[in-house]
Image: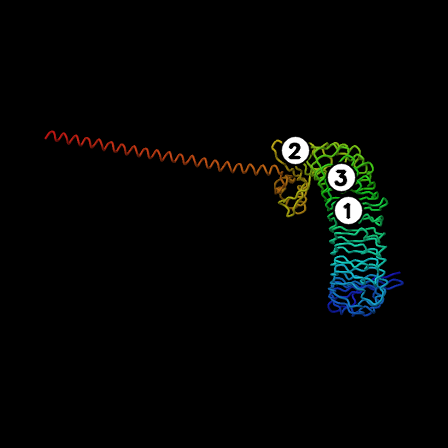
């Protein structure tokens, strides 16, 4: 019979100390958790001999003095995390003979020592992650010979002295991730014959010696992702036969010619994504008969040799997304690769697929071909004929299909067809009879006048050949239901009053007003609009210039006519003046003659 209860015992300055009793029929364990405390609070326990687990979190303890825990005779688990701990005196852990787990994570430690004069033979778990340790020396772990789990992640390690792990022959899990290691040498992990998990991701490793892991025949998990590796010759190590998981993603690997495994390799998962691979040659995966998951996505693949995958007889999932593949040769997925269930070929540059490419894959369940340039659908019909009824999910969204054989698509469990260049006439006809397993639309967020939240509406795009326009069809049926539901909850009484006043008990079923969203238009339409706008502006300016010239010419003609009229008037005046002068002269002559 056992009992369990808890209560607050005492409140000390700078912290709240809580005792949790766990009483059992044959033993009594006591756990203390201290938060927001100081170093002196560690000495204020009424009876430290009965404490089995001590957790110190988010405190201010910059140093630990010698023999601070000398009276904690029964302490099994000790955690001092995130407490600004920068240094431990030489014998700060002296007396912790029964300690099994020690965590000093997320502090400011810059070195690793034994911190004890005695062998800590019971210690099996040591967590020093999140500190500022720059190097591991030969005697860093000489008192921890029973270690099985060591976490040194997120430090500043640039160097691991040769033989440093010679003192830890029982070590099985070693985490050196998120450090600054640049190379792995031959004897760096010497003496760890039981090592099964080695985590080296997120370092700056550029080179690994070919014999670096010869002393680790039990290796099962190796993570090297997030480094700067260019070559993988170290994988030819015969001790990798028992390796199950290998992660080489986010490196700079350009070729797999050096990656040769023995025929009896147990490798189950291989991740080569986010590298610089341009092609996969035949024999690259020799010896990987037990491989089930292969990820080569996000590379620069342009070519896969026909026999490159023939040895992967147990392969179930193949990721080839986000590459530059333009074609897949017949026989790429040969008769030996019949176990494939998931193939991802999305976001490549495939313009066509042979009708028989997937003909030998009866177990295929997921095929993603989205984001390519596919236009022909012969392979869809061929694949539908060999598939078990309603067993395959097919993604063809983001291609260049104008129309498809809808009868063949009904044989699939689910088909995604959004973001294609559908012919509007064909689309409308097929939408009237399509089964629920076929989806043409994608969610589009729009504003509504009755809710502050964005509303997701299913949208379907097509292209009308007659008017040369892309058209977006919005399904507002769900929006109407949402609006009616909100009206029913929030405005029931008001709606009833309005219906009585108007003599009608039926609520309007008109489509709700929508604010039209910003929709990505076809590139051709956008370009055409810009071109026609420029042409219109040019014509307008030309018309203005012509009009201006006509006006100027008219004004000049008017001015010329005025000048001519003025000139004629002057001539007329001169003529009259000359006639008058002659008359006066003749008159004068006549008068003279008379006299």
Q: Which residue is mark 1?
A: 271
Say which label, 2 or 3, has the lower sequence index: 3
Residue 73 x/y as whole percent: 85, 67
The Cα atoms of the two marked residues, 2 and 1, are separated by 42 Å
Residue nearest the observer in this picture, 253 or 453? 253
* Label 2: few (<14), some (14–19) or many (≥20) C-alpha neighbours in 10 Å: many
Q: Look at the numbered disc 3 and give the secondary structure of its residue.
A: strand
Residue depicted at x 14% and y 29%: 590
Say whether marks 2 and 1 touch (CB < 8 Å): no
Return the mark for residue 568.
none
Return the mark for residue 304.
3
Residue 445 x/y as whole percent: 65, 44
Q: Which residue is mark 2?
A: 424
Relative to 360, say whether 125 is above or below: below
Residue nearest the observer in this picture, 57 or 155? 155
Q: Look at the numbered disc 1 and give the secondary structure of its residue.
A: strand
């Amino acid at each position: 019979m056992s009992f369990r209860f808890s209560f607050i015992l005492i409140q000390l300055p700078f912290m709240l100390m809580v005792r949790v009793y766990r009483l059992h029929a044959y033993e009594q364990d006591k756990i203390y958790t201290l938060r927001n405390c100081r170093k002196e609070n560690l000495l204020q326990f009424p009876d430290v001999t009965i404490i089995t687990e001590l957790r110190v979190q988010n405190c201010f303890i910059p140093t630990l003095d010698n023999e601070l825990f000398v009276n904690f005779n029964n302490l099994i688990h000790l955690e001092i995390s995130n407490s600004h701990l920068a240094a431990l005196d030489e014998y700060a852990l002296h007396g912790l003979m029964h300690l099994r787990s020690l965590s000093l994570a997320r502090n400011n430690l810059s070195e690793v020592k034994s911190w004890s004069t005695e062998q800590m033979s019971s210690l099996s778990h040591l967590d020093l992650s999140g500190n500022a340790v720059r190097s591991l020396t030969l005697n860093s772990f000489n008192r921890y010979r029973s270690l099985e789990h060591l976490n040194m992640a997120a430090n500043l390690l640039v160097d691991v002295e040769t033989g440093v792990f010679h003192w830890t022959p029982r070590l099985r899990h070693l985490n050196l991730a998120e450090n600054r290691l640049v190379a792995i040498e031959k004897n760096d992990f010497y003496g760890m014959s039981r090592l099964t998990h080695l985590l080296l991701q997120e370092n700056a490793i550029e080179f690994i010696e070919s014999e670096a892991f010869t002393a680790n025949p039990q290796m099962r998990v190796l993570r090297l992702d997030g480094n700067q590796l260019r070559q993988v010759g170290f994988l030819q190590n015969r001790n990798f036969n028992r390796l199950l998981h290998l992660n080489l993603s986010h490196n700079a690997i350009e070729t797999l010619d050096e990656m040769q495994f023995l025929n009896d390799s147990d490798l189950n998962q291989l991740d080569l994504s986010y590298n610089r691979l341009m092609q996969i040659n035949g024999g690259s995966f020799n010896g990987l008969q037990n491989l089930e998951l292969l990820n080569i996505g996000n590379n620069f693949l342009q070519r896969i040799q026909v026999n490159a995958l023939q040895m992967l007889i147990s392969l179930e999932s193949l990721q080839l997304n986000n590459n530059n593949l333009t074609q897949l040769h017949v026989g790429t997925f040969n008769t030996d690769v019949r176990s494939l269930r998931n193939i991802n070929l999305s976001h490549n540059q495939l313009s066509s697929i042979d009708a028989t490419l997937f003909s030998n894959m009866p177990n295929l369940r997921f095929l993603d071909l989205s984001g390519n340039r596919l236009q022909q659908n012969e392979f869809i019909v061929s694949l539908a004929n060999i598939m078990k009824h309603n067993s395959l999910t097919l993604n063809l969204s983001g291609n260049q299909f104008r129309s498809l054989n809808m009868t063949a698509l009904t044989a699939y469990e689910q088909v995604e067809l959004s973001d294609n260049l559908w012919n509007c006439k064909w689309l409308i006809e097929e939408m009237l009879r399509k089964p629920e397993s076929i989806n043409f639309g994608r969610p589009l967020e729009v504003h509504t006048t009755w809710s502050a939240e964005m509303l997701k509406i299913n949208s379907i795009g097509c292209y009308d050949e007659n008017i040369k326009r892309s058209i977006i069809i919005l399904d507002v049926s769900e929006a109407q239901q949402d609006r009616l539901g909100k009206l029913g909850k929030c405005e029931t009484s008001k709606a009833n009053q309005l219906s009585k006043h108007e003599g009608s008990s039926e609520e309007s079923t008109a489509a709700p007003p929508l604010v039209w969203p910003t929709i990505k238009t076809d590139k051709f339409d956008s370009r055409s609009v810009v071109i026609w706008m420029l042409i219109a502006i040019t014509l307008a300016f030309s018309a203005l210039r012509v009009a201006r010239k006509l006006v100027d010419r008219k004004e000049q003609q008017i001015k010329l006519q005025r000048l001519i009229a003025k000139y004629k008037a002057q001539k007329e005046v001169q003529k009259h003046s000359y006639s008058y002068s002659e008359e006066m002269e003749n008159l004068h002559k006549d008068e003279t003659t008379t006299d």
